[in-house]
Image (cartoon, grey):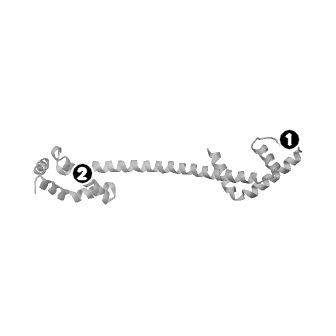
Amino acid sequence: MYSDLELVTGLREGNELVFESIFKNYYERLCNYANTFINDMTDAEEMVQGTFMTLWEKHDVIDVHTSLKSYLYRAVHNNCLNHIKHTHIKREYNNEYLHYADIEYEQVSNELMGKELECKINTAINSLPPQCQTVFKMSRYENLTYNEIAEKMGISVKTIENHMIKALRTLRVELKEYLPLIILLLWFKNLN
């Protein structure tokens, strides 16, 4: 067995036997200590292995003020805190990423549903008789009143009403399977 001074001196000189002795003496205890912070023995072992790797890589410049034991425990403690902080940051990033991915997915999904619905509406409108189709488009797309449409087309307001009833009935039948989608899209549109 080596004294603390001999261990630190041997380590600074790059003595592999001294390093191996330090490793064998402290590894298991440091893993258990790290596990109290991390609650995952595999990660705890990685923290301790990382501490020993750094210890060996910087063996010629280590500065032990109190004891080697205190130095090792403090190094493992700091590695564990860094690991916890890094894990917390990763978790926050993942949560934020998932949040924005969900929003992006909803937007793309809504856009696709909207395009599909628009296509179905256009197909249903195009299936209307020509005069009925014209009346519907003037009412819904040009926002003309029934009186304005009747005046432009030279037909009675009652005929315009009949065309609109027929158009809306046809659309309701043609788009009945899309009613939940229409309600959903209107709901999302009102949220934004």
Where, quadrant-wise, is the C terminus in this rendering? top right
Q: Nearer the viewer, residue 163 or 84?
A: 163
Left or right, residue 159 beside residue 37: right
Residue 84 x, y percent position in the rendering: 35, 50
**Helix, strand or loop under label 1:** helix
Q: Report which residue position mark 1 lands on.
A: 147
Residue occupying the point 67% across, 56% down: 180
Report crowding for label 1: few under 14, some 14 to 19, many 20 or more residues within 10 A (C-alpha).
some
Whether pointer 1 and pointer 2 mark residues with C-beta atoms closer than 8 Å, the reply is: no
Q: How many marks?
A: 2
Residue occupying the point 10% across, 50% down: 6
Residue 28, placed above or below residue 80:
below
Mark 1–mark 2 Cα distance, whole angstroms, equals: 85 Å
Residue occupying the point 22% across, 57% down: 27
Q: Nearer the viewer, residue 183 or 27?
A: 183
Where, quadrant-wise, is the N terminus in this rendering? bottom left
Left or right, residue 90 beside residue 22: right
Q: Is residue 160 visible?
A: yes
Type of amino acid at the residue the image marks with label 1: Asn
Picture quadrant where residue 175 is located: bottom right
Type of amino acid at the residue the image marks with label 2: Thr
The mark found on residue 51 in the picture is 2
Residue 91 x, y percent position in the rendering: 42, 51
Left or right, residue 100 beside residue 49: right
Q: Is residue 65 visible?
A: no
Report crowding for label 2: few under 14, some 14 to 19, many 20 or more residues within 10 A (C-alpha).
many
